[in-house]
């Protein structure tokens, strides 16, 4: 049994991954934005260790004392579509803080435990981290930056036995995707998109690799092509 920290475990991909790990009798460490949400996670995932961590305020982040951490999964994120002509400084800052700065801070704080376990860091990025489309500037900027962090960390920590993988899911049936469709003025049909469980299965495949291999990047796309922008 290993110890695994998952951000964003309340819904979507994070919830699917946390549920899958709990089913395997793994030890979960779950951050939550407020004490109330931490209690909700503790009730939902019996045996999990929860703590308060507001990703929108990276400078305030602290982590529990862990001797070993087998994997760290950065899944939580925010998105709010707007063209560059209308994006506000506050919106841009929120995207960068939650999607980029907080993962860097958490990773730095947890590196000693990851090194001790020869652990894995998974950055759940997005297809927007590969191509920036109109109205996605703030979100894509944070995700392009996250890919850069993953690439740098991979080289820095290889000698310490820490592996780093970036997962690039395309449109996935999550509450975030439902919000995106609303902002785009599109009808949301969850059946068209990747299920969160499929992305979680992809992450588990990376986690279960033997020590002689690593998957630096993996892209997951729905079978039904997306014809919009």
Image (tube, grey):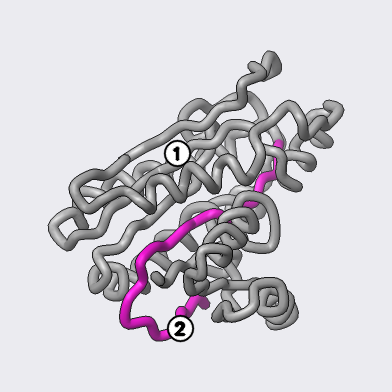
Left of 69 or right of it: where is 99?
A: right
Left of 25 or right of it: where is 13?
A: right
Name of the residue lying farthest toward the left? 159
Q: Is residue 161 magenta?
A: no
Image x and y of residue 81, in percent? 70, 37
Image x and y of residue 116, in percent? 24, 73
Does 41 appear above or below 157? below
Image x and y of residue 187, in percent? 86, 28
Q: Is residue 84 visible?
A: no
Which corner quadrant of the image does residue 46 belong to?
Answer: bottom right
Mark 1 → mark 2, Cα distance in angstroms: 29 Å
Left of 10 or right of it: where is 170?
A: left
- Magenta span: predominant SS is loop
**Residue shown at 64%/44% (left/top)?**
196
Q: Which residue is mark 2?
A: 64
| Mark 1 or mark 2: whose residue is earlier in sequence | 2
**Residue shown at 51%/32% (left/top)?**
220
Image x and y of residue 146, in percent? 43, 47
Does 110 appear above or below 91? below
Does 122 appear above or below 24? above
In which quadrant of the rendered image does the N terminus lie?
Answer: bottom left
Quick one: SS at disc 2? loop
Does 172 appear above or below 3? above
Q: Nearer the viewer, mark 1 or mark 2?
A: 2
Q: Which residue is mark 1?
A: 144
**Residue shown at 75%/37% (left/top)?**
180
Which corner quadrant of the image does residue 217 belong to?
Answer: top left
Q: Which residues are magenta?
A: 60-81
In which quadrant of the rendered image does the C terminus lie?
Answer: top right
**Residue shown at 48%/42% (left/top)?**
202
């Amino acid at each position: 049994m290993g110890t695994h920290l998952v951000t964003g475990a309340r819904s979507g991909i994070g919830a699917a991954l946390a549920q899958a790990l709990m089913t395997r009798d793994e030890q979960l460490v779950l951050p939550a934005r407020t004490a109330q949400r931490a209690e909700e996670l503790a009730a939902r995932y019996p045996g999990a260790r929860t703590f308060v961590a507001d990703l929108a305020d990276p400078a305030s982040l602290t982590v529990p004392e862990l001797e070993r951490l087998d994997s760290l999964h950065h899944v939580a994120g925010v998105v709010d579509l707007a063209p560059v002509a209308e994006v506000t400084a506050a919106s841009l800052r929120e995207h960068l803080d939650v999607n980029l700065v907080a993962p860097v801070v958490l990773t730095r704080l947890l590196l000693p435990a990851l090194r001790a376990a020869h652990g894995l860091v998974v950055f759940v990025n997005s297809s927007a981290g590969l191509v920036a489309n109109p109205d996605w500037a703030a979100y894509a900027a944070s995700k392009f930056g996250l890919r850069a962090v993953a690439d740098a960390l991979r080289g820095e920590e290889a000698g310490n036995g820490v592996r780093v993988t970036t997962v690039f899911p395309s449109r996935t049936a999550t509450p975030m995707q439902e919000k995106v469709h609303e902002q785009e003025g599109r009808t949301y049909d969850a059946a068209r998109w990747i299920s969160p469980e499929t992305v979680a299965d992809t992450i588990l495949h990376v986690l279960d690799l033997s020590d002689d291999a690593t998957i630096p990047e993996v892209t997951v796309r729905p079978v039904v092509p997306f014809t919009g922008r």
